[in-house]
Image (cartoon, grey):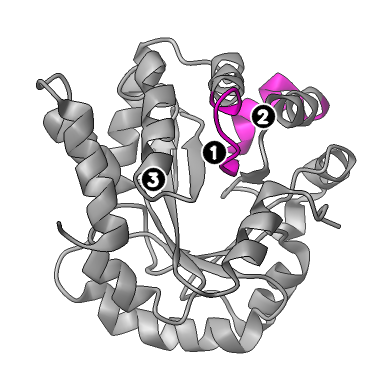
Amino acid sequence: MIKTDNRITQLFERNEGSEKIMSLFLTAGYPDLEATVDLILGFEKNGAEMIELGMPFSDPLADGPTIQYSSNVAIEQGITMKKILHIVEQVREESNIPIILMGYINPVLRYGTEEFCKDAAEAGVDGLIIPDIPVEESKVLTDKVAKYDLPMIYLVAPNTSDERMRKIDQQSQGFVYCVSVTGVTGAREGDEIAQSVQRFIGRVKENVTKNPQMVGFGIKSHEDAQRIAADMDGFIVGSAVIDTIREHYLEEGWKDEVFAFVRSLKYGKE
């Protein structure tokens, strides 16, 4: 059972549905190692209430071109699992924002599941999202995450059956990640999401009753977030943030441009 002093639990308890929680995804080591820490701290100051820190992997099956690009840049610049955990340690020197590591099982297996969970907990990580570990195969991690009080957060998607949504809800801790569209990560154009998300969210509300619900994939604006997350506890944005970093990186004042975008996601355009 997730501890009551876990930062994710505390965040949802503090919020009590009063506003939509904004979680931002950032690839660790992108656009460079030093900037990752500054960006996380800046995200928090500009409206983010939770961070999903991506662990770059060379075969990211759930990620679209944007996050694949950022992962490749981070890998080329020498990001490692140890360096990712050090990023968390650096953030913890200044912030208690909940941090969830999101990535794939291969690097975790290579690191060693026991050592990874121990080191992640000691660094200040609050939870794990491993998209290529379905609940049916989660025993590879369940004992270790329980030992080190690291909640596992599972995903549901429009093609998840009602029965499986209920199973995922029972095994997930912290919240359930609701993938708004089938397919990989990435901002969508037009009304692709709106057409499918309402039917999906209706089923989520019926079947996910134990955990808070966060919706992600395809959100690129405040208006998207407000519409798609209207019946959810919050929303998650990743590719649109990374696209903004990519657009402005190395320009004078590029971080200010990124933080202005973050504020616009949370509060609307200034």
Q: Residue 126, position in %: x, y?
A: 67, 42
Residue at 28% from the left image edge and 47% from the top image edge: 262
Residue 189: which quarter of the image? Answer: bottom left
* Tag of residue 103: 1
Work out whether residue 65 can be spotted. Answer: no
Please tell me which residue is depicted at 48% across the width and 36% down the height of the picture: 54
Instruction: Pick out the residue farthest to the left.
Output: 251
Relative side of 90 to 58, left or right: right
Nearer-the-camera pick, 1 or 265: 265
Residue linked to disc 3:
63
Q: Nearer the viewer, residue 52 or 217?
A: 52
Amino acid type, mark 3: Asp
Task: Write down the residue under mark 2.
Answer: 108
Q: Is there CB contact under 8 Å for labels 3 and 1?
A: no
Q: Amino acid at mark 1?
A: Gly
Tell me the quadrant of the picture where the C terminus can be found.
Answer: bottom left
Q: Amino acid at mark 2?
A: Val
Q: Is residue 33 left or right of residue 66?
A: right
For the residue labelled by badge 1, is the local secondary structure a helix, a strand or a loop?
loop
